[in-house]
Image: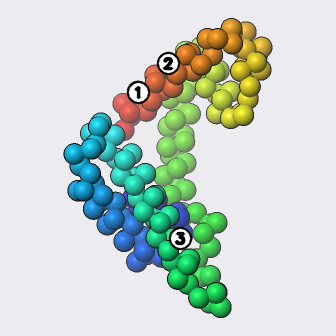
Amino acid sequence: MWAVARAVGLSPTDAADAVQGAWLRLVEHYDRIRDPDRLGAWLVTTTRHEAIRLSKRAGAERPSELPDLLDPTEPDPSAVVVDAEYGRAAWARLDALKEPCRSLLRLFALNPDIRYSHVSTHLNMPMGSIGPTRARCEKHLRALLEESE
């Protein structure tokens, strides 16, 4: 959670506030958590939202003549490491999938704007089966990723 807040570009003090705010949101909304197994993901997302909110507020309050000491375009090194490790794990799990899932998900991951007609031609799949197949493949990949956590 700390790495997520810092990756937004918050100071250590504001990052601590964002993390504390995320925990507070959990206490306030614990009865609305639908999937307790996904609590970690919910906390990360909530931390990101809190950090962005604090970042916008801090930007509005910061005097324009002061230099910006934190470059928000530079990611927090720990967040880069965590993201890289998760990325390696995700690609390893994707490689463990059988065809056509492996090729289908790889096409969409590497070409997010690809059209179904191109996927159909490239993988020799009927266009009508791409969406349902993709949903099944993503569900299977998600299950493999959750197993590894």
Q: Are marks 2 and 1 in contact (CB under 8 Å)?
A: no
Indicate the secondary structure of the residue bearing disc 1: helix
Q: Cα distance, mark 3 to mark 1? A: 35 Å
Residue 78 visible, this angle: no
Q: Which residue is mark 2?
A: 136
Question: Does label 3 or label 1 sit earlier along the sequence?
Answer: 3
Question: Does label 2 or label 3 sit earlier along the sequence?
Answer: 3
Specify the amino acid type for callout 1.
Ala
Question: Does label 2 or label 1 sit earlier along the sequence?
Answer: 2
Quick check: 1 above or below 91?
below
Number of numbered labels in the structure image: 3
Specify the amino acid type for callout 2.
Arg
User: Callout 2 environment at 10 Å: few (<14), some (14 to 19), or many (20+)?
Assistant: few
Question: Residue at the location (73% across, 14% down)?
Answer: 120
Question: Is 16 left or right of 91, judged from the image as shown?
Answer: left
Q: Which residue is mark 3?
A: 56
Q: Which residue is mark 1?
A: 143
The percent position of residue 96, horizontal first and vertical second, equals: 52, 22
Quick check: 149 above or below 65?
above
Question: Residue at the location (50% across, 46% down)?
Answer: 85
